[in-house]
Amino acid sequence: MHEALARANFEQDVAALSDAAASRLGLVVHSRTFPIFDVTIEHKPAVRLRFHGEDFDERPPGIDILKPDGSNWAGPMPPGGVFNGGPHSVKGGPFICMRGSREYHTHSSHVNDNWANYRKQEGMGIVGILLQLNGVWRKGFP
């Protein structure tokens, strides 16, 4: 994918979440500079999600699950399997097992569920995926 196109796709998508909206949702945006969108979900427990969009939207964003300080996640995961303790079959470690994450679409269990089937659907951009994960995290830790 051409970097300029990936950058334009990424920047357009992450601009959809204003700082005011993020604050209302209990999110702290640490970075939205191509290719990284880095956000903490302020909740108990808090979790940081780092989206990698170097080739968005030709490929889904990769998503790291981190502690709020940016170190590797080692805490509990909400029930349901979207936040999967791992290890991922390719990447290793904990991962997001949900349509729209690179880790889902590259996992040996889901390689036939092609990203192309979802990439243009509403809610499947980087911010839409973040909002879904925010809901899952908060429901898992009421």
Image (cartoon, rainbow, N blue to C red):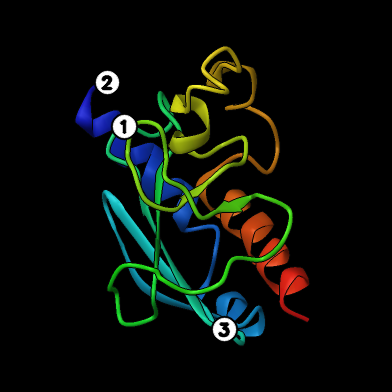
Q: For residue 73, what is the image quadrant?
A: bottom left
Q: Secondary structure at mark 1?
A: loop
The earlier-in-sequence mark between 3 and 2 is 2
Q: Secondary structure at mark 3?
A: loop
Q: Nearer the viewer, mark 3 or mark 2?
A: 3
115, above or below 142, in the image: above
Tag 2: amino acid: Met
Q: Are marks 2 and 1 in contact (CB under 8 Å)?
A: yes
Q: Are marks 1 and 3 in contact (CB under 8 Å)?
A: no
Tag 1: amino acid: Asp
Q: Quote the CA–CA distance across marks 1 and 3.
A: 31 Å
What number is the disc on residue 45? 3
Q: Which residue does the numbered mark 1 point to in the structure image?
A: 55
Residue 123, horizontal then vertical, whole percent: 68, 44
134, above or below 53, in the image: below
Residue 114, horizontal then vertical, whole percent: 56, 16
- Identify the residue at the far bottom of this view: 44
Compared across the picture, whether 73 is left or right of 83 comes to: left
Compared across the picture, whether 117 is left or right of 127 comes to: right
Q: Quote the CA–CA distance across marks 3 and 2.
A: 37 Å
Q: Counting other residues with Cα less than 10 Å from the Cα at mark 2, is it few (<14), some (14-19), or many (20 or more)?
A: few
Tag 3: amino acid: Pro
Residue at the image point whose x is 53% and y is 71% from the top: 18
Q: Which residue does the numbered mark 2 point to in the structure image?
A: 1
